[in-house]
Amino acid sequence: MTDVFMNTYHRLPVTFAKGEGSYLFDVNGKRYLDFTAGIAVNCLGHAYPPLVKAIGEQTAKLNHVCNYYQSDVSAAFAEKLVAACAGMKRVFLANSGAEANEGACKIARKYSLMKHGPGRHTIVSLRGSFHGRTITTLSATGQDVFHKDFGPFTEGFVYVQSGNLAELDQALDKNSVAGIIIEAIQGESGIKPQDSAYIAAVAKFCAERDILLIFDEIQCGIGRTGTFLAYEAYGVQPDIVTLAKGLCGGVPAGAVLAGEKTADTLSTGDHGSTFGGNPLAAAAGFVVLETVTNPLFLKEIARKGNLIQSTIRGWNHPKITEIRGRGLMIGADLTVEAWPILEACLAQGLLVLSAGKNTLRFLPPYTINDAEISEGLAILKAVLA
């Protein structure tokens, strides 16, 4: 492994050279079953033939055009994306989740300024949330562990505890708050789905006080939970939605979608992105949308997730205290630290993730089959033993 990279990652001792379906292969040819999908990025697995074909064909035609103009493929992708996200009217195409969340915060603050005047710019987020690593999205992230050493932060962010309605009511002050940003399922803090009654209360407060409801669907969206967007399971309609990770199946991309209230908030020059709407990403994203918006495909994601959860529950393993999640976004709480288990799985040819100190996280590609699920879970069970 090279040592020229900055020391920003706790890298495991493996270097990958290629992937195929649900497997990755290291430089020595050893095969690993992938239950990570690049942290929910490679949603269609590795070297998915339609994705490879679309990217290759697009490379031969047009790699980049600046946003003075449109490309045919980015226009087609944008139209398909807006159509897939119920209630959304316009989209801004970006490069990453952090960039998408920055855009959402800008939209919320400008909307509130235009509608209600200055002084109403606070963004509320939940404790345990994760919204990115820029200075502003770190400000929105409700976990102290990510804040260490990087202050001062962008002002105007406050945190509330999910489930505490009294605290929520007080925090959503109609005179100072522009929006609230929520992950339907928190990923980085341990795969924690939001309570339905709490989300209903958030939506009610927002509607009554003209506070924008923003759903961060960066990890839990694009089919990951068995619905195209995770918030669909709660029966609410957000004003802004952010996407990234699996959006283009492995090609860097992000998106901010605006609903009826916010569709026309940004004007020429208010926001931009050099690589946003890149034709290569758009070509890949079109394939992802063609695949993932299929109701039968989404039903299979839900079924496979239920298979994983029911199998692990059936073990009644003393080291597993809880298994939770939706679709192929699953967390298992352990009585021991997760990282040594992760390392042991790697040695046996299984890639899994951690989320916090004691939670294993499973985010396999949607294309994984039942036999591969059984293979991976057999390795996990043996490691836990």
Image: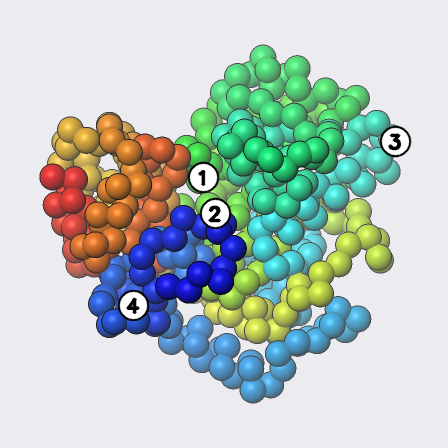
Q: Secondary structure at mark 2?
A: loop
Direction from residue 292 to residue 385 in the image, left or right:
left
Closer-to-camera residue (192/327): 192
**Mark 2 / mark 3, whichever is N-terminal:** 3
Callout in the foreground (3, 1): 1
Marks 4/2: CA–CA distance:
26 Å
Residue 110 sits in which quadrant? top right
On screen, 200 above or below 345? above
Residue at the disc numbered 3: 117
Residue at the disc numbered 2: 219
> How many other residues sit within 10 Å of disc 3, few (<14), some (14-19) or many (≥20)?
few
The amino acid type found where label 1 is placed reads Glu
On screen, 39 above or below 367? above
Direction from residue 362 to residue 200 in the image, left or right:
right
**Mark 4 / mark 2, whichever is N-terminal:** 4
Closer-to-camera residue (335/187): 335
Marks 3/1: CA–CA distance:
35 Å
Q: Position of residue 165 (x, y in %)?
A: 55, 16
**Mark 3 / mark 1, whichever is N-terminal:** 3
Q: Secondary structure at mark 4?
A: strand
Q: Position of residue 71 (x, y in %)?
A: 68, 75
Residue 149 sits in which quadrant? top right
* Marks 4 and 3 close (CB-CB < 8 Å): no
Q: Position of residue 162 (x, y in %)?
A: 51, 24
The amino acid type found where label 2 is placed reads Gln
Q: Residue at x 66, y 41 (%)?
A: 135
Residue at the disc numbered 4: 26
